């Protein structure tokens, strides 16, 4: 049962990490702001954070940082060093937090 819970956490971390990264890439590539032109407000381009401009890293470091954000968010310790910077990234963060609540409730119920 413990192994299954660990697999669920790893899967959810991978899933939301990929979704969070994909949301940032979508906003950068497909969303145009009518007033300013190309949209550049994303966690991938926030250069004054702890990790610099994540967009220009290789894919392994971007994956590690994406899953780091997901794990910190799902375990509700979210340190604030990687934060959502636009409305779509905020929505993904909210969905991840709700999914974490359900996962914890489900696993606590199974342990009981």
Image: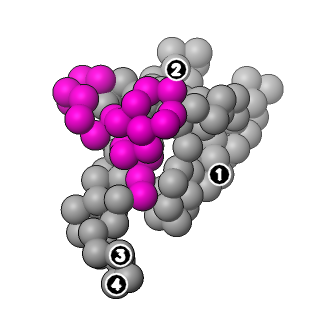
Tell whether label 2 touches label 4 (CB within 8 Å). Answer: no
Q: Which residues are magenta?
A: 41-61
Front disc: 2 or 1: 1
Q: Could you tell whether 25 is left or right of 74 in the image?
A: left
From the image, tell me which residue sits under label 1.
Answer: 98
Q: Residue furthest right?
A: 112
Identify the residue at image location x=31%, y=30%: 63
Asked where in the image residue 47 lies, by quadrant, the reply is top left
From the image, tell me which residue sits under label 2.
Answer: 6
Q: CA distance from mark 1 to mark 3?
A: 33 Å
Q: Sequence-wise, which precedes: disc 1 or disc 4?
A: 4
Q: CA distance from mark 1 to mark 4?
A: 32 Å
Q: CA distance from mark 4 to mark 2?
A: 45 Å
Q: Sequence-wise, which precedes: disc 4 or disc 2?
A: 2
Which circle marks residue 36 in the picture?
3
Which quadrant would the N terminus be assigned to in this image?
top right
Q: Could you tell whether 59 is left or right of 101 in the image?
A: left
Which structural element holds mark 4?
loop
From the image, tell me which residue sits under label 4.
Answer: 34
Tell whether label 4 touches label 1 (CB within 8 Å). Answer: no
Q: CA distance from mark 2 to mark 3?
A: 44 Å
Which quadrant would the C terminus be assigned to in this image?
top right
**What x and y, as percent, mark residue 51?**
43, 27
Q: Nearer the viewer, residue 52 or 86?
A: 52
Q: CA distance from mark 3 to mark 4?
A: 6 Å
Q: Sequence-wise, which precedes: disc 1 or disc 3?
A: 3
Front disc: 4 or 2: 4
Q: Sequence-wise, which precedes: disc 2 or disc 1?
A: 2
Which structural element holds mark 3?
loop
Queried whether the magenta region covers residue 49, the answer comes back as yes
């Amino acid at each position: 049962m413990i192994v299954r819970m660990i697999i669920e956490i790893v899967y959810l971390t991978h899933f939301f990490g990929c979704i969070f990264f994909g949301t940032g890439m979508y906003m950068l590539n497909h969303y145009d702001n009518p007033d300013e032109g190309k949209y550049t407000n994303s966690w991938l381009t926030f250069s004054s954070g702890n990790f610099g401009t994540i967009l220009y890293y290789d894919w392994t470091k971007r994956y590690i940082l994406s899953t780091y954000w997901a794990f910190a968010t799902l375990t509700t310790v979210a340190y604030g060093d990687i934060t959502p910077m636009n409305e779509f990234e905020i929505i993904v963060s909210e969905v991840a937090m709700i999914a974490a609540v359900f996962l914890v409730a489900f696993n606590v119920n199974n342990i009981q």
